[in-house]
Amino acid sequence: MRELLLVGAGGFAGSIARFLLGGWVTQMTTASRFPFGTLAVNAIGCLCIGAISAYAEQTNALTAHTRVLLLSGVLGGFTTFSAFAYESWFLAREHQWFLAGASVVVQVVVALAAVSIGHSTVQLAVR
């Protein structure tokens, strides 16, 4: 039961952060139809999950409950791959083939790079 409450509390915080950050980035990029708000949230979420997982692996400083709160809760609520899928699908449905393809490729490449950078950065810092 404790883990469920931690995931729920973290998800609440992560969802609010996603809403605020994604909305702000979207407002800053209104001239483009490309989903930059979702890209920003996914990149930051992936960077954080890479960094937190590396820190947890290298130091054993995070309890199992802290990992559940941060990884499943906060970051699970924060990242937006369901929005990514919908927005890419919507662009394709509107026959915006280049933007749809670009969204898929850029989102995945940036996410993988961010996980790698976050993980590597913390591994180097903890050594």
Image: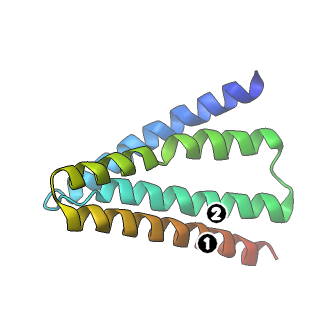
Task: Name the residue carrying label 2.
Answer: 50
Can you tell which quarter of the image residue 68 is in?
Answer: top right
Residue in view at x 54 percent, y 68 percent:
112
Residue 66 location in percent, x, y? 75, 42
Name the one closer to the observer, 127 or 110: 110
Q: Quadrant of the C terminus?
A: bottom right
> Please, which colouring scheme is shown?
rainbow
Sequence order check: which comes first, mark 1 or mark 2? 2
Residue 53 location in percent, x, y? 71, 59
Query: What whole-number distance in Å separates the C-alpha atoms at marks 1 and 2?
Result: 6 Å
Q: Amino acid at mark 2?
A: Gly
Q: Secondary structure at mark 1?
A: helix
Image position of 118 with respect to 12: above or below: below
Residue in view at x 35 percent, y 49 percent:
22
Image position of 66 with respect to 26: above or below: above
Using the rendered image of the protein, determine whether residue 11 is visible from the camera's viewpoint.
yes
Task: Name the residue carrying label 1.
Answer: 116
Residue sitting farthest toward the left: 31
Residue in view at x 66 percent, y 75 percent:
121
Residue 15 location in percent, x, y? 47, 38
Please report contact status of discs 1 and 2: CB closer than 8 Å, yes or no. Answer: yes
Image position of 41 with respect to 115: above or below: above
